[in-house]
Amino acid sequence: MTLPQVRIGSLSVSRLMIGGNPFSGNSHRGPQVDAEMRHYYTSERIKATLREAESLGINTLVARADAHICRTLLEYWDEGGTIQWIAQTCPELQSSVLSALAAVANGAKACYIHGGVMDNLVAGGQVDEALGAIDTIKRAGLPAGVAGHDPAVHRWAEANADVDFYMCSYYNSFRRDHNAAYSSHADERFCDEDRRAMAETIQTVSRPVIHYKIMAAGRNDPREAFSYVAQVLRLGDAVCVGVYPAHKPDMLAENVRLFEQCAARV
């Protein structure tokens, strides 16, 4: 099975990508669901999910450059898997530059700066770290991007950064002005006005966009979510969706079906 593909720098990527937040236990649904995801997603289950994704035509994973993901991908590729990895830098490492270097060393095909970090750096006017990480990624020969939950990130990058792609979150569920890292205890709010604001921003940027958090971390009906994407998606854009099939084994296949309907309208 094949899916339509677009270009991210030198990469040809499926327009539907699988997201890795559930693999790392980042549910955006609170500490209990985070823990459930960590228990569910053993290395074997992650690899089985990636095999299913490839069988459905997905050729790209978007996931954190943490030690767990790096190790699991090494095993997956050694066992014959071919999915390509767009890496997200990790706030828990000392800097975005060091995290980008770890992604490069562990087989990433592209890399972008974590959305919470970008929200934090732009809000604080401390963008040198972002520019240094972008330069590091590009000097390694990889497409470089930035993520952001706040549209201000993408407006800043359009004016100031030489990036190859954007990761645009449909929701800005909690402010990262003072702390860049994800917290499972945060009081997260998924508001329609945030989705509208990011949809408007996407139409103004000059590089391909990977649309993410389209499901509001499982709060949106999948059909409504993909229907909304169809109104916003541009010809060179892609969509990233994570899956947690513990209670819905056909979740990944359903996402592919809904995306195909969505893409047919663009």
Image: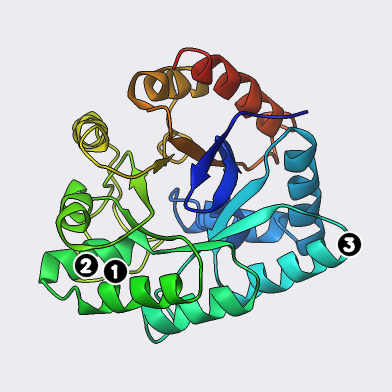
Judge depth for marks 3 and 2 and give the one in front: 3
63 is higher (above) or lower (below) than 95? above
Gap between marks 2 and 1 measured at Cα: 5 Å
Looking at the picture, which amino acid does disc 2 mark? Asn
Q: Earlier in the sequence, mark 3 or mark 2?
A: 3
Q: Which residue is mark 1?
A: 180
Q: Earlier in the sequence, mark 1 or mark 3?
A: 3
Residue 153 place in picture, x, y as percent: 21, 55
Along the viewing direction, whichever of 5 and 102 lies nearer the viewer = 5
Q: Image quadrant for the N terminus?
A: top right
The answer to whether the residue labelled 2 contacts the one labelled 1, judged by CB atoms less than 8 Å apart, is: yes
| Label 1, residues with CA under 10 Å away: few <14, some 14-19, many ≥20 | some
Along the viewing direction, whichever of 248 and 20 lies nearer the viewer = 20
| Label 2, residues with CA under 10 Å away: few <14, some 14-19, many ≥20 | many
Q: Image quadrant for the C terminus?
A: top left
Answer left or right for 157 relative to 213: left
> Residue at left 28%, top 62%?
162
Name which quarter of the figure residue 216 lies in: top left
Q: Which residue is mark 3?
A: 79
Element class at badge 3: loop
Q: How many marks?
A: 3
